[in-house]
Image: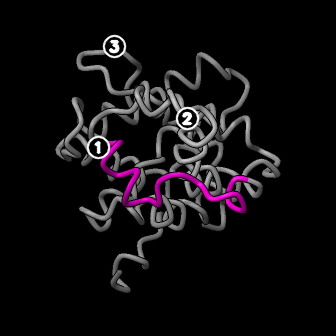
Amino acid sequence: MGKAALAVRFRSSDELVARLESAADADDDEPVDLLAHALQCAAILERVAPADRELQIAGLVHDLGILVPPGRPETHAAVGAAAVAGLLGSRVADLVARHDDAKRYLVTTEPRYRHRLSDRSRETLRLQGGLLDPDERAALDAYPDLDALLTLRRADDAAKVPGARVPGLGHWRTVLEGLACPAA
């Protein structure tokens, strides 16, 4: 991965919202564009975890790394986490960084989960490492925020419904601004 891709860091909620808006034109071989997917994911998380704003925002931004650089599903979680860490904090960044590991965890621990994945998500599963080995599984089993991480992953997989009606970016702007670190 080039240094330019690693250098992407969001410094304001306005910059982040602008990048999210550009995701409306991004195609990841899923039934919805990346903006619709992000908004659906955040809305699902708002419904199932109404008090956890960091989790909701992690759902909104979890796939931003797909845009920088495009076509790298095996690294998008780490790239996205690095891009939002300074602005949105370590918990949001950590959830973003681990959301693909959560897919691997669910497929490893619940073999039927693989059938819930979209075709594209099954393709990227292989690129992201496939099933967890015993050490990787033990590490995730010990992860203190595992429940939130798995909730994010399940929302990620459910947030691919064409035409779903969910709140737009304006709904999330205040939440983003509330979480944004002033020194970002």
Q: Position of residue 25 (x, y in %)?
A: 17, 44
Query: Is 126 included in the stretch rendered in magenta?
Result: yes
Magenta stretch secondary structure, dominant: helix
Instruction: Report the coloring of the rendering.
Output: one colour
Residue 11 in view here:
no
Which residue is tagged 2? 174
Q: Is residue 39 left or right of residue 113?
A: left
Q: In percent of the image, x 82 and y 48: which residue is there?
A: 144
Crowding at mark 2 (Cα within 10 Å: few <14, some 14-19, many 20+): few
Which residue is tagged 3? 165
Residue flagged by tag 3: what amino acid is it?
Answer: Arg
Place residue 174 in its image quadrant.
Answer: top right
Q: In percent of the image, x 43 and y 24: which residue is there?
A: 158
Q: Which residues are magenta?
A: 121-137
Which residue is tagged 1? 21
First in sequence: mark 2 or mark 1? 1
Circle 2: element type:
helix
Q: CA distance from mark 2 to mark 1?
A: 16 Å
First in sequence: mark 2 or mark 3? 3
Q: Position of residue 165 (x, y in %)?
A: 33, 13
Residue 36 in view here:
yes
